[in-house]
Image: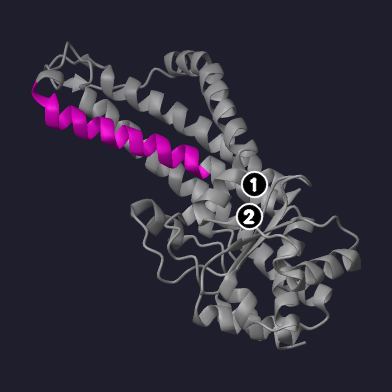
């Protein structure tokens, strides 16, 4: 129930920012002159609500189509982002045996297994249903961890799948991506307006707002929405890492092996070439050298991953 309420917060945030955007346009774009010739701004709530209600179908329709495409294309999107390939049983029967044994232990269907050719260490789970559930590991992880450590890591990822964490995370990633993409487009539009058409388009007609001011209001609203979507995603997923650690320790039957694996991964977390903070949120450990832009920096402030030392300390208590 808690996670469902948090997921409902995403569309509420988007719709709330649309209302605030329309309200700001109404407030700064209207107004009247008092007896001293000063322009007085006022908010016409009825007018804002009218335009908001008229806008809702377009917003819901656009976000819905965007969300549906991203939701059902997530498997190929994630696979392409990390450069993964499908791992065949004959290529590495050791991994298949570990995954099969753990799945039999917890009574779940076996997910697909992907591998990334990366000498560093990392792993993650992804997918929204049985046909797309996938566990991805790096070649470095397979080569440097022993069977018990590897079972702990894979058990962690299988717990994410069993708890539907991957579905929740991918849903949150899509909403954050929608807001960040819209904000990037508005910023680019404002830049082009100021650079190429600022002198012509900044002229007012009556009390109307210039295009630059309209876009600036849009950027501010998008930034606020982006901040709150990051906070919501943070609330959804950080505690689930601890739950997955506990599930992985229980499945593998060796908490200390998982703690040992996390210690090794924390010394050399791979997949830092992905350069996509949203996808990195899926990893068992965030790449410490991943180069990110402004959006990635904002996302890292609300990382879904707890401190590795705390995770290791909790596991070593058992």
Whole-Å distance between the Cαs marked 2 and 1? 7 Å
Determine which of the numbered discs, if any, sits on residue 236 in the image: 2
x, y percentage for residue 92?
A: 71, 69
Mark sitting earlier along the chain (2/1): 1
**Compared with residue 92, is residue 237 higher up or lower down, i.e. above or below?**
above
Question: Is 193 situated left or right of 282 in this image?
Answer: left
Query: Front-most of 22 and 7?
Result: 7
Where does the magenta region start and end?
A: 176-199
Judging by the rendered image, the residue that carries numbered circle 1 is 6
- Quarter residue 37 falls in: top left
Question: Is 148 situated left or right of 286 in this image?
Answer: right
Q: Quick check: marks 2 and 1 in contact, CB under 8 Å?
A: yes
Question: Is 311 situated left or right of 217 in this image?
Answer: right
Label 2 neighbour load within 10 Å: few <14, some 14-19, many 20+: many
How many numbered marks appear? Answer: 2
- The secondary structure type at the circle numbered 2 is helix
- Quarter residue 292 falls in: bottom left
x, y percentage for residue 227?
A: 44, 48
x, y percentage for residue 257?
A: 72, 85
């Amino acid at each position: 129930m808690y996670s469902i309420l948090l997921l409902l917060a995403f569309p509420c945030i988007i719709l709330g920012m649309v209302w605030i955007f329309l309200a700001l346009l109404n407030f700064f774009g209207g107004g009247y002159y008092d007896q001293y010739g000063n322009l007085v701004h006022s908010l016409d709530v009825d007018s804002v609500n009218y335009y908001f209600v008229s806008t809702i179908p377009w917003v819901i329709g656009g976000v819905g189509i965007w969300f549906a495409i991203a939701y059902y294309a997530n498997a190929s999107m994630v696979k392409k982002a990390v450069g993964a390939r499908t791992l065949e049983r004959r290529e590495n029967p050791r991994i298949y045996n570990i995954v099969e044994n753990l799945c039999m232990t917890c009574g779940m269907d076996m997910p697909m297994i992907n591998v990334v050719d990366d000498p560093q260490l990392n792993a993650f789970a992804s997918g929204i249903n049985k046909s797309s559930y996938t566990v991805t590991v790096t070649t470095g992880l397979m080569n440097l961890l022993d069977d018990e450590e590897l079972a702990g890591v894979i058990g962690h990822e299988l717990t994410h799948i069993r708890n539907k964490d991957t579905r929740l995370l991918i849903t949150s990633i899509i909403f954050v991506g929608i807001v960040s993409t819209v904000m990037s487009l508005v910023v680019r539009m404002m830049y082009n307006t100021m650079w190429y058409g600022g002198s012509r388009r900044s002229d007012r007609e009556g009390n109307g707002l210039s295009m630059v001011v309209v876009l600036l209001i849009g950027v501010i609203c998008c930034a606020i929405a982006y901040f709150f979507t990051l906070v919501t995603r943070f609330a959804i997923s950080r505690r689930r890492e601890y739950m997955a650690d506990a599930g992985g320790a229980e499945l593998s039957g060796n908490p200390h092996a998982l703690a040992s694996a996390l210690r090794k991964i924390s010394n050399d977390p791979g997949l830092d070439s992905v350069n996509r903070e949203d996808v990195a949120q899926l990893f068992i450990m965030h790449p410490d050298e991943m180069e990110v832009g402004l959006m990635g920096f904002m996302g890292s402030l609300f990382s879904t991953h707890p401190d590795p030392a705390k995770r290791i300390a909790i596991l070593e208590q058992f």
